[in-house]
Image: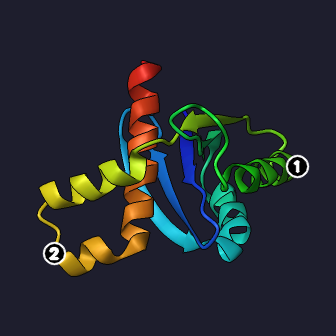
Amino acid sequence: MARILCIDYGAKRTGLAVTDPMQIIASGLTAVDTKDLMPFLKKYVLQETVELILIGDPRNLDDSATHATPLVHQFIKKLVKEFPGIPVETVDERYTSKMAKEAMLQMGMKKKERQNKKNVDEIAATIMLQEYLVQHQ
């Protein structure tokens, strides 16, 4: 089987998470500067078989678009063009950053590690991916 890749897209940084090849466990992959995201993804897809790309869809509580929604939708167009053989689906990313911060506290991460926004982004992507796996098993 192939991996599922999840993207927590941000204007500055993007968190990434992947499943194991059996699609049982979601694990944080990394967080990269968004300007370096597409080259990173191209290299990753050459090294690993990815069967699905999930990307967080930023929404307000009332389901309206946020300031970041258009950026994500523009990036989705680039993903579809660059990786035409890999389906792209959006997932709800509401509360994932807050959940990531809470998870870091529960894991006992030091304050300096919790303040590293790359850690938050990577964990948020992992949470989105884990929720997707739970819903689709």
Residue occupying the point 41% across, 72% down: 117
Disc 2 marks a residue whose amino acid type is Lys
Disc 1 marks a residue whose amino acid type is Lys
Where is residue 29? Give x, y as percent: 45, 60
- Please tell me the numbered disc located at residue 90: none
Outermost residue to the bottom: 112
Quarter residue 38 falls in:
bottom right
Could you tell me which quadrant the C terminus lies in? top left
| Residue 124, placed above or below residue 42 | above
Q: From this viewpoint, is residue 20 visible?
A: no
Where is residue 116? Give x, y as percent: 35, 76
Determine which residue is flagged by label 2: 110
Left or right of 33, for residue 15:
left
Residue occupying the point 67% across, 55% down: 67
Helix, strand or loop at mark 1:
helix
Outermost residue to the front: 62
| Residue 79, placed above or below residue 131 | below
Where is residue 62? Give x, y as percent: 56, 31
Left or right of 9, for residue 28:
left
Give the CA distance from mark 1 to mark 2: 40 Å
Q: From this viewpoint, is residue 86 visible?
A: yes
Q: Report the label total.
A: 2
Residue occupying the point 54% across, 41% down: 3
Say which label, 1 or 2, has the lower sequence index: 1
In depth, the one of 13 and 98 nearer the eye is 98
Helix, strand or loop at mark 2:
loop
In depth, the one of 98 and 133 nearer the eye is 98
Task: Single out the mark in the foreground, 1 or 2.
Answer: 2
Where is residue 84? Give x, y as percent: 84, 42
Determine which residue is flagged by label 1: 81
